[in-house]
């Protein structure tokens, strides 16, 4: 029996239950991992609340992201061996001391990436990789708006976009968060609670507006985000921290400048094994070079998962949060 955090019914952070579970031996194509750290992400809350249905039903072990050491390999596994350091994003099961993982979804960690770094960056960092390099290709001269610039995805995105040569504008909820964002590559910060972010974007850009808006907030920033875009600009909605965007009349994209809008997710961008490896390799490269740092600003014991969720949803966290068994 090993410690884990399970969800028996949808609800708030209080439904995260710390208990002992049995983890089976690895089956065909699986590996068993002794976990050293697990990431905490908004998608975990979406599953906990029932916004995303659990693919395994109830109860389920929460968590989508983790890093650890391979304890055992199942039949048919040839490219991963016992003792390998690996990280993982995918099916539920991250909030546990041990877990089973499909071997073809695990990524080997370079020596210069720690378990805690990996747990704090695999989901968020690979999300940033595809957002900035594939969904809309950020390059020198790009002007981008990043909502929640001091959050887990936000701090990585600000650094990476800055590294690629973009002008980075970020919305934040407090002056303290503004300072954190600025230290992580954000050139201009907007206090969204006190300022009209559309008006500030127009002021910052002298009316030229942004090439792309990266929005992990959802309901409360839409449709205002569209007014921050130049004609033919890209609205990239990749999260729903404030609730999902309701259905809207698609003609609004035409009236606001023949805009593009997309709702991408990491799973589709790394569905192929080759894309997963390439995306992770690019992340490891920029982090290993020091161009992008992974701020692990909150570290919790596994048994305190409910507290981690409460603080994340209360906007009381910055950067990455992890659970340690």
Image (cartoon, grey):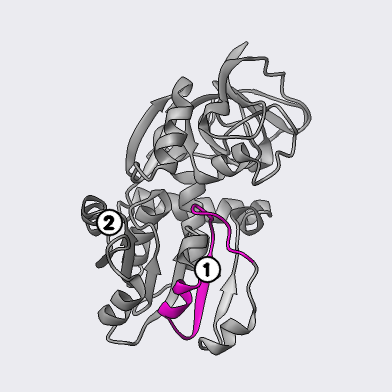
Give the residue drawn at x 54%, y 83%: 259
Give the residue drawn at x 38%, y 77%: 142
Give the residue drawn at x 44%, y 42%: 313
Residues shaded magenta: 223-246
Residue 230 lies left or right of residue 82; in this view the side is left
Q: Is 56 in front, or is 1? A: 56
Disc 2 crowd, CA 10 A, few/some/many (<14, 14-19, 20+)? many
Q: Which mark is residue 236?
A: 1
As measured in the structure, the alpha-carbon distance from the residue carrying label 2 to the one carrying label 1 is 20 Å
Based on the picture, tell me whether residue 231 belongs to the magenta stretch.
yes
Image quadrant assignment for residue 230: bottom left
Residue 137 shows in this picture: no
Q: Is 107 in front, or is 186? A: 186
Return the residue at label 2: 181
Q: Is residue 186 above or below residue 175?
A: below
Based on the picture, tell me whether residue 177 belongs to the magenta stretch.
no
């Amino acid at each position: 029996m090993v410690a884990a955090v399970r969800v028996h019914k949808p609800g708030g952070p209080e439904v995260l239950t710390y208990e002992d579970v049995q983890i089976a031996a690895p089956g065909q194509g699986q590996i068993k991992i002794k976990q050293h750290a697990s990431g905490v992400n908004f998608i975990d809350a979406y599953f906990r609340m029932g916004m995303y249905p659990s693919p395994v039903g109830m109860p389920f072990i929460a968590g989508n992201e983790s890093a650890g050491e391979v304890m055992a390999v199942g039949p048919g596994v040839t490219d991963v061996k016992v003792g390998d350091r690996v990280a993982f994003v995918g099916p539920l099961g991250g909030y546990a001391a041990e877990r089973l993982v499909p071997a073809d979804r695990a990524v080997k960690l370079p020596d210069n990436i720690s378990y805690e770094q990996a747990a704090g960056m695999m989901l968020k960092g690979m999300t940033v990789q595809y957002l900035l390099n594939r969904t809309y290709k950020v390059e020198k001269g790009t002007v981008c708006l990043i909502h929640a610039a001091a959050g887990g995805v936000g701090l990585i995105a600000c650094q990476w976009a800055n590294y690629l040569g973009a002008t980075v504008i970020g919305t934040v909820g407090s002056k303290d968060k503004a300072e954190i964002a600025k230290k992580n590559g954000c050139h201009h910060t907007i206090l969204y609670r006190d300022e009209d972010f559309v008006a500030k974007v127009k002021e910052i850009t002298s009316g030229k507006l942004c090439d792309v808006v990266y929005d992990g907030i959802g309901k409360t920033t839409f449709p205002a985000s569209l007014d921050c875009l130049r004609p033919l600009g890209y609205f990239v909605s990749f999260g729903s921290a404030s609730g999902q965007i309701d259905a809207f009349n698609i003609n609004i994209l035409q009236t606001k400048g023949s805009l593009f809008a997309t709702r991408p997710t990491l799973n589709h961008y790394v569905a192929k094994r080759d894309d997963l490896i390439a995306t992770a390799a690019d992340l490891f490269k920029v982090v290993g070079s020091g161009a992008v740092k992974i701020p692990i600003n909150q570290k919790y014991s596994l048994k305190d998962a409910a507290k981690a969720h409460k603080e994340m949803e209360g906007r009381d966290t910055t950067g990455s949060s992890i659970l340690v068994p």
